[in-house]
Amino acid sequence: MSERLCGLLFFLILAGAGLLPADDWPQWRGPERDGVWRETGIVEKLPRKLTYLWRTPVGMGYAGPAVAAGRVYLMDRVLGAGEANPDNPFNKKRVSGRERVLCFDAAGGKLLWKHSYASNYTISYPYGPRTTPTVSGGKVYCLGAMGDLLCLDAGSGKVLWSKQCVKDFGAELNTWGYSSPPLVDGEKLIVLVGGKPGACYMALNKDTGKELWRALEDTDPGYAPPVIYKAGGVRQLIAWTPTKLAALDPETGKEYWRQEFKVNFGLTIPTPIYDPGSKRLLVSSFYNGSMMMALDPSKPSARLLWQGKSDSELPKRTDGLHSIMCTPVFQGEHVYGVGSYGELRCLEASSGQRIWKSMKATGQGRWWNAFIVRHEDRYFIPNEQGELIIARLSSKGYEELSRAQLIEGTRPVQRRKVVWSHPAFAQKCVFARNDKEIVCVSLAASAEK
């Protein structure tokens, strides 16, 4: 028997026994930062009652979990003695407390280690950290809401290096605090800092924290996660701030191209998305709607394809897609995303024309939200009510396959209680958190009933 045939037989035996290593979700939006879950052997429809493998208490926070090498990493916040968050979430009074980085056993939910540090909030919605940890090369990188940037040993929680973005880089804290998860690229850690001079984006050595380069002048950096796409024969770091959309050389910070785009109140939140087939790049904001760029296939440049004309988030005054938190998705010649008042919308990618809208996944209200994660030919949609939905999306409309309650909504927002934390999909499970607990639910095909 040939060596190749033996290897194939061994692979099939492992697959049949369920012993192949499961996929991780080591950073914001998954292994490739693209919101795609690539594991196989996942339920076709959700069972009537979900199977909880474990549930463990945690503190407050908007940060989603990361899953890597059999461990789950999460940031949360505990208030100082006698402290309380303000009744008005826009009140930016000083609230003392501590941010924490927590590490759990992915199989059983046992707390393996924690690292905490003082963090006194002076931001709107002061309910905890916003950023998903980034796990790479045996290290975990975390960015707190007040700008505390940490590199910890993933196994022990020992701090290897740290920076304070406001103090060390001259940054000005924005309204909702730091919300953009760091990106590991080779030896670099790329961070949306908002520092000065010329340090809106920075690259640090991931092992030492030493500055490698800085780029762009925006002191209000917004909140959009950095992401790298290959286009025009080069790798382009997409930088989206409240004044512009730009592409940088990730090795040097040199600017390739830019498109001015004024976004009200700094609300550049969703991740910019790119479709390599059509060479289109999309961003979407709450008030100012969406903008689509066409990237040149032969050189690092871009041109404006279309831009929404509405500057209002009110449903009857919007003209396309006005995302607040949900990163849209490309599927062929269409774009799907959640708008300003919870509408799941379909746009024609080439023109921005709206094809349809549906309220079935989210319900309707200001800032109502759901996240969209692609799996094979369907989507897992965790909404802010704590439900998990499996649906198909096409130009013909929204087709719901199943839904189940995943986790309780705990954060009060306009007379409702919400979950605004993006889950992780890994090891044939979904890992979700609210302000009280983190849960692990099996989504393996064997859990389907």
Image: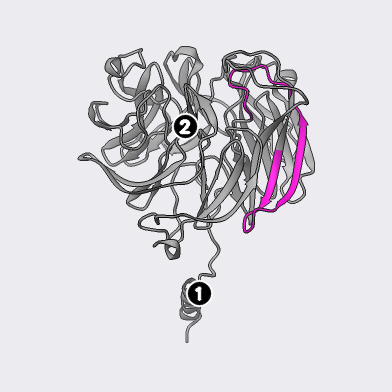
Q: Amino acid at mark 2?
A: Thr
For the question of whether residue 295 can be seen, the reply is no
Q: Amino acid at mark 1?
A: Ala
* Residue for point 57% across, 48% down: 439
Write down the quadrant of residue 61 in the picture: top right
**Foreground label between 1 and 2:** 1
Q: Is residue 206 above or below residue 351?
A: below
Residue 421 location, x and y as percent? 53, 36
Q: Is residue 415 above or below residue 106?
A: above
Write down the quadrant of residue 107 in the picture: bottom right
**Mark closer to the chain start, 1 or 2:** 1
Badge 1 local density, few (<14 within 10 Å), some, or many (20+)?
few
* Residue for point 38% across, 29% down: 282
User: In this view of the protein, which residue sits in the foreground, 267 or 87?
Assistant: 87
What segment carries the magenta color? 101-128
Badge 2 local density, few (<14 within 10 Å), some, or many (20+)?
many
Disc 1 target residue? 17
User: In this view of the protein, which residue sits in the foreground, 305 or 86?
Assistant: 86
Disc 2 target residue? 271
- How far apart are labels 1 and 2 at the CA level? 38 Å
